[in-house]
Amino acid sequence: MNRSALYTLVVLAYGLTACGGGGGGGGDDDNTPVNPSDNQAQQLSWVAPSTRTDGSFLDLSELAGFKIYSGPSANNLELIADIEDGHVTSYDLSSMTAGNYFFGIVAYDTDGLNSPISERIEKTISE
């Protein structure tokens, strides 16, 4: 089956918490980060893509999962998790060693097509 590539995930969140963005039709504030609550401070959250790179609709049932990448710089990331569930849009980082990290996410569909890596964010993980 010849399918278009997945759309790039648009948003990783400030403080590694949830925020709006992605394929929704909210408004200009969709990409505005939200302040983390204490219990969310070590969590990475994102918005699943709803379109492919060619602009065609991506049904959530076609989304197979997400790959989480992390590393010491935006251009030096390694896979740290493969979430094999397209409905999961957060990842717990509380087990990571304290330090400064960059994060990026790749979405993949049921046909094995990967999105380009998302915009990278930088975050300090505290103890």
Image: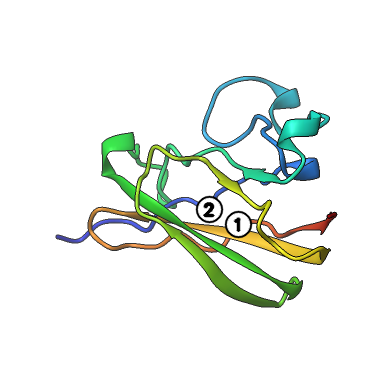
Give the colour scheme shown: rainbow
Q: What's the residue type where badge 2 is placed?
A: Thr
Pick the residue in front: 94 or 30: 94
Please tell me which of labels 1 and 2 falls first in the chain: 2
Work out how far the residue at label 1 is from the one at label 2, CA to CA, in angstroms: 6 Å
Which residue is disc 2 drawn over? Answer: 8
Q: Residue at x 24, y 53 (%)?
A: 110
Which residue is disc 1 drawn over? Answer: 118
Image: 22 above or below 104 = above
Residue 70 falls left or right of residue 35: left
Give yes or no for contact between labels 1 and 2 (Cβ–Cβ under 8 Å): yes
Corner quadrant of residue 112: bottom left
Q: Residue at x 37, y 43 (%)?
A: 86
Image: 15 above or below 76 = above
The answer to whether any part of residue 33 appears in the image is no
Describe the element under mark 2 as helix, strand or loop.
Answer: loop
Residue 107 falls left or right of residue 18: left
Q: What's the residue type where badge 1 is placed?
A: Ser
Residue 10 falls left or right of residue 56: right
